[in-house]
Image (spheres, coloured by chain):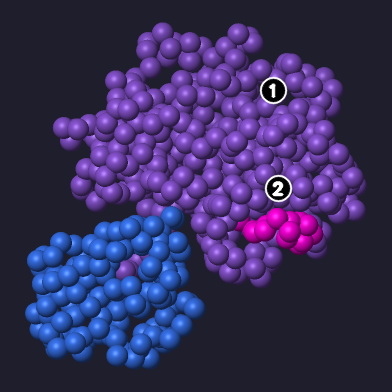
Chain colours: A blue, B purple
């Protein structure tokens, strides 16, 4: 699976896409594959403040529960409500099935995250796929 | 998304994730080298995700065939095949074998015909569970108990010690078999292609012996842990034979859409059917009345280990009971989560909970006080510090359709 080169990644397997002051967050294809069939996604409310490294929500497969961490800080401007009823979208298209959009507190924070190439190396070293 | 905490569906898991004081972790398993079944290489070849289950390296799901959800549905709608070789087997044979079995188990083995199986349990003197077992009557004075993987050594010791006063021999056969479960409505059609035994003559919870894949005298039992029709076969434990039978089953089931199934599907299938899992619905701190297994408890059969305590427990009154829950609000109740009343007071705990792939809802089994156990009662399950409303619903959550005549 190709990791989009215009995204940044975390070692906790979230991705971040930055467009101006707006960030979009989701979980990586490696993450959805490790989890298996995703049946539940819990996301924050619009207006909530996210802090880099802190939990923003939860994703659950039949067999596993996992926290989603905010790659960067900011204010939630939009959440992908469609995932409430179709969480399996994350399995089908992890890099398209975004979870939250936020107004970035400090756009330079994103530069601390991994590039696609580095993330891929990281996953390979972790014993991933 | 960090730390994929695989949780909830098996003992393995409660060992990793249940909080230290969790009601699910009353017994701990000592660290020993990981064990492998004879089919280990086959699972890996089929792309299984492997996990440590009670010290066994076992497949949890097979992503290349579609994963847990697909495996679960294959068993409900067609057929699936499981490696359950980690299960143990204890043979009790000799002139007083029946008396010994009666002494250590709660169901009545007296009326069993040769070729019959019966669900039962071994109890501590306190009326709580050593393990649940399936008793097979193999011959005149010859019984076999099929036991759980996580309790193997404990069970073998228990049986050995507690049958000593009888004229019989207890023998651990656990390493003698590769046990393969062929489960689902098409299980019978799949297995029939591989055996000369007439499976239509084998009723549910009975067994026979027959040639399977050219192997003579194979034990074929119509039993399982999926709340579905199906068979469990016991084949020689060497790797080539085990692999040959596994692939033959896969081939025979191809026309019915057979898939290999892991422990993940095994857990969700048994949960939908309200089949208890040791360390969860039953344990050394839960008694038979609480677990709601009195259908398999024969107080009138005579004395047996645990009987006196159960009599007292009943006279004292049962305080908690196992109920089925369904989430009303959004959220999946998981093993070990607290059950609250509607005022937020802690009243019990979830023993097993999951999204149910066939029923397509979030369900759980939980211990609650009797006054909260009526069908329709509303309680809450605490999920990530938030109460999520659930209601008590009838169990089993899933019952297989009656067979067409």
Residue B256 belongs to magenta span: yes
> Can the viewer see residue B79 in this picture?
yes
At label 2, counting other C-alpha atoms closer than 10 Å, the crowd grade (few under 14, some 14-19, many 20 or more) is many
Q: Which residue is mark 1?
A: B101
Above or below: residue B332 compared with residue B35: above
Q: Which residues are magenta?
A: B247-261
Q: Main secondary structure of the magenta part?
A: helix
Residue B398 belongs to magenta span: no
For numbered disc 2, what is the local secondary structure?
loop
Residue drawn 60% across the image and 8% down it: B300
Residue drawn 84% across the image and 52% down it: B194
Residue B13 position, x and y percent, is: 44, 52
Q: Are marks 2 and 1 in contact (CB under 8 Å)?
A: no
At label 1, counting other C-alpha atoms closer than 10 Å, the crowd grade (few under 14, some 14-19, many 20 or more) is many
Quadrant in which residue B261 is drawn = bottom right
**Depth check, front residue: A34 or B187:** B187
| Residue B221 located left or right of residue B88 | right
Between disc 2 and disc 1, the foreground one is 2
Residue B22 position, x and y percent, is: 34, 42
> Can the viewer see residue B366 in this picture?
no
Can you say which quadrant of the picture contains the C terminus of chain B?
A: top right
Give the mark nearest the N terminus, 2 or 1.
1
For numbered disc 1, what is the local secondary structure?
helix
**Depth check, front residue: A65 or B52:** A65
Cα–Cα gap, marks 2 and 1: 34 Å
**Depth check, front residue: B58 or A17:** A17
Residue A105 position, x and y percent, is: 9, 79
Residue drawn 30% across the image and 38% down it: B390
Give the chain of mark 2: B
Q: Which residue is mark 2?
A: B186
């Amino acid at each position: 699976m190709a990791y989009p080169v215009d995204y940044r990644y975390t070692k906790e397997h979230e991705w971040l896409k930055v467009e101006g002051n707006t960030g979009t967050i989701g979980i990586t294809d490696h993450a959805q594959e490790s989890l298996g069939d995703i049946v539940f996604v819990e996301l924050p409310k619009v207006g909530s403040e996210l802090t880099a490294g802190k939990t923003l929500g939860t994703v659950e497969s039949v067999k596993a529960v996992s926290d989603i961490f905010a790659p960067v800080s900011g204010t939630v401007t939009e959440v992908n409500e469609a995932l409430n009823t179709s969480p399996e979208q994350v399995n089908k298209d992890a890099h398209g099935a975004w979870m939250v959009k936020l107004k970035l507190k400090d756009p330079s924070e994103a530069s601390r995250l991994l590039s696609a190439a580095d993330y891929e190396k990281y996953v390979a070293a972790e014993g991933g796929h | 998304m960090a730390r994929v905490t695989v949780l909830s569906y098996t003992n393995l898991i409660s060992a990793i994730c249940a909080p230290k004081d969790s009601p699910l972790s009353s017994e701990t398993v000592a660290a020993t080298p990981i064990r492998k079944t004879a089919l280990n290489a086959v699972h890996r070849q089929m792309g299984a995700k492997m996990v440590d289950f009670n010290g066994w390296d076992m497949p949890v799901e097979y992503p290349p065939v579609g994963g847990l959800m697909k495996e679960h549905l294959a068993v409900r709608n067609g057929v699936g095949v499981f490696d359950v070789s980690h299960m143990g087997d204890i043979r009790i044979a000799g002139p007083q074998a029946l008396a010994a079995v009666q002494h250590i188990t709660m169901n009545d083995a007296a009326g069993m015909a040769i070729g019959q199986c019966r669900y039962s349990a071994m109890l501590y003197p306190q009326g709580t569970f050593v393990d649940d077992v399936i008793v097979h009557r193999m011959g005149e004075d010859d019984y076999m108990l099929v036991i759980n993987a996580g309790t193997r050594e404990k069970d073998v010791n228990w049986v050995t010690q507690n049958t000593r006063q009888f004229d019989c021999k207890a023998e651990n056969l656990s390493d003698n078999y590769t046990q393969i479960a062929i489960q689902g409505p098409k299980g019978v059609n799949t297995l029939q292609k591989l055996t000369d035994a007439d499976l239509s003559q084998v009723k549910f919870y009975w067994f026979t012996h027959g040639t399977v894949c050219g192997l003579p005298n194979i034990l074929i039992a119509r039993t399982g842990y999926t709340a579905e029709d199906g068979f469990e076969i016991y084949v020689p434990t060497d790797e080539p034979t085990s692999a040959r039978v596994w692939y033959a089953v896969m081939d025979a089931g191809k026309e019915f859409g057979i898939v290999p199934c892991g422990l993940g599907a095994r857990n969700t299938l048994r949960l939908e059917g309200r089949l208890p899992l040791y360390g969860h619905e039953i344990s050394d701190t839960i008694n038979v009345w609480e677990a709601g297994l009195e259908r398999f408890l024969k107080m009138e059969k005579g004395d047996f280990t645990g009987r006196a305590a159960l009599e007292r427990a009943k006279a004292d009154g049962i305080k908690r009971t196992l109920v089925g829950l369904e989430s009303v609000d959004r959220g999946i109740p998981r093993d070990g989560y607290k059950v609250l009343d509607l005022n937020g007071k802690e009243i019990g705990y979830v023993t097993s909970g999951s999204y149910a792939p066939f029923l397509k809802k979030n369900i759980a089994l939980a211990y609650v006080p009797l006054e909260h156990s009526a069908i329709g009662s509303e309680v809450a399950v605490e999920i990530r510090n938030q109460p999520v409303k659930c209601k008590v619903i009838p169990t089993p959550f899933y019952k297989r359709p009656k067979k067409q005549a």
